[in-house]
Image (cartoon, rainbow, N blue to C red):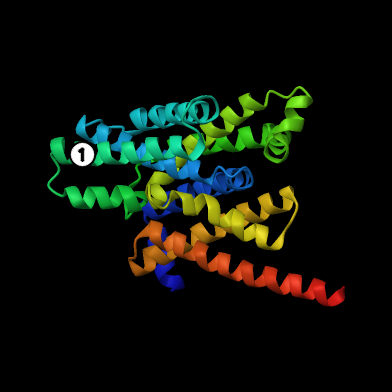
Amino acid sequence: MTAQLALYWQYPFVRYALIVGVLISLCSSLLGVTLVLKRFSFLGDGLSHVAFGAIAVAAVLNLSDQMLLVLPVTVLCAVLLLRTGQNGRIKGDAAVAMFSVGALAIGYLLMNLFSTSTNLSGDVCSTLFGSTSILTLTKTELWLCVALSLAVLAVFVLYYNRIFAVTFDESFARATGLPAARYQMLIAVVIAVIIVLAMNLVGSLLISALVIFPALSAMRVFKSFRAVTICSAVLSVCCSTLGILISVLTGTPVGSTVVAVDILAYALFSLLGALQRRGAAAKA
């Protein structure tokens, strides 16, 4: 197995996949903790469907670089979802459902009506589940992913204290003069960027798992925000790396394999959490 991994490591596409996979998993895990605690988990799922619709439009228009359309559309929809859910007549999960289902349906309709591809079902499957797209990254896409990932990490580090405040007690943050709405908007925009990046790794239907599972796993064992965030980041990177390597060696779909590893990690951390609580109860 070591010799086989060494052989595959000589190919640039494997190195690109690992670099992008590690960066995407790191970024998604950091904001995933905030999404889970603020009960915004459905936002990632809704934006992933919006991204699918944007990809369908880009495919119909034969754009050479789909990111030029997909990224701004997804960011715009993130802003609209947040504003609509807070101030409009359509609240919360209803607004997300309207955007996500509408974008998914229109995207698939456009692909059926105007696509010139000879393998439409394969294209749809690859977009939804990220079958092999991360193994076909170009050097330009690699550097774009690196740049966007570093930007996301910089935002999280620079605004960590404010994100923490808005996550745990938004009312208190407003009372202290913190512009909570502005930072909520910042979180939504960053999540939109992560969703677009993660499309290449796990596909639009599995993105929520990449964002949610590491955070939930860490919460089974740790209680503080900092500890959960660090554990979630480390766990997400390890699971993505292991999932990509297993996929390369066995030929399984990358996205599904990564999510399967995340599920196993969640089961393990749930067991560790149960043992931890039982030990604490026994001492008491």
Amino acid tagged 1: Leu
Q: Nearer the viewer, residue 255 or 84?
A: 84
In this rendered view, identify the residue nearer to me: 166 or 233. Answer: 166
Residue found 21% across the figure and 29% down from its top: 61
Residue occupying image coordinates x 50% and y 33%: 91
Horizontal arrangement in the rendering, residue 52 relative to residue 94 (left or right):
left
Q: Is residue 198 above or below residue 114?
A: below
User: In the visual, does 135 lie left or right of 217?
Assistant: left
Does the rendering let one see residue 7? no
Residue 104: quarter of image: top left
Judge whether 52 appears above or below 87 on screen: below
Q: Position of residue 147 (x, y in %)?
A: 50, 34
Q: Residue 19: where, in percent of width, then height?
A: 48, 49
Left or right of 97, for residue 120: left
The residue to which callout 1 is attached is 109
Residue 243 left/right relative to 218: left
- Picture residue at 34% right of the left edge, 61% below the top: 253
